[in-house]
Image: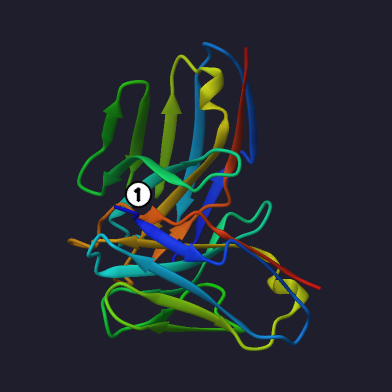
Amino acid sequence: NAGVTQTPKFQVLKTGQSMTLQCAQDMNHNSMYWYRQDPGMGLRLIYYSASEGTTDKGEVPNGYNVSRLNKREFSLRLESAAPSQTSVYFCASTQLRENTGELFFGEGSRLTVL
Amino acid sequence: GENVEQHPSTLSVQEGDSAVIKCTYSDSASNYFPWYKQELGKRPQLIIDIRSNVGEKKDQRIAVTLNKTAKHFSLHITETQPEDSAVYFCAARGTSYGKLTFGQGTILTVHP
């Protein structure tokens, strides 16, 4: 039982390049999330998908797009990377019940944009 | 949308002392308040959570209290140990179904 799996774990991009972060969960959770973590700023929500077929913006969606490919997979795309997007990205999932539910995080993806 | 403020940003205690971390939230309809612990280089993990219909919850050395009127909640760690050293995050889930907003985090250091 792998839980939440993110790929890649490390990536270096040049300004303007594009890339997709992949996330998959094997816990049959209905909700999935993408957060970014920067020093002193906590975990900031980029996008989330409360259920298969829906996606919503979080606090910092600009410069990102997401796709809930199916119940298991939720990808995050950077169309034209900028240095401000250098960060650690975490994918998470939960089984929402009455708007509660423990988030299970992936190991994180460290992205550097030069 | 929901806004969560967390204080202090850093906290240093001696082993055996208690530690308290406080959070305030803005959405009066928020109904779920979890706390996560993140050790260096690791992923965040849930340590305790509380729902809005409960005022206090304990689990061994950790407890969380909630004051809905004042819109704040706190994490209490008693008899701290060096392995409690980590970053702690509070969070709140409000009226936007599924959306979980985190505070800025508190770096807790427990000195032996």
In the image, residue B98 above or below residue B83 = below
Indicate left or right for A34 with A99 as reference: right
Q: Residue at x 78, y 82 (%)?
A: A15
Residue A81 position in % (x across, y down): 70, 82
Q: Quadrant of residue A8?
A: bottom right
Q: Residue A92, located in which quarter of the rendered image?
A: bottom left
- The residue under the point 43% across, 69% down is A23
The amino acid type of the residue labelled 1 equals: Phe
Tell me if I can see residue B49 in this picture: yes
Question: Which residue is label 1 attached to?
Answer: B33
The furthest residue to the right: A114
Snapshot colouring: rainbow
Callout 1: few (<14), some (14-19), or many (20+) C-alpha neighbours within 10 Å? many
Where residue A14 sits, quadrant-wise, is bottom right
Residue B26 makes an appearance in the image: no
Please tell me how many numbered marks the rendered image carries: 1
The quadrant of the image that shows the C terminus of chain A is bottom right
Q: Would you say A101 lies left or right of A69 here?
A: left
In the rendered image of this protein, does residue A96 appear above or below residue B64? below
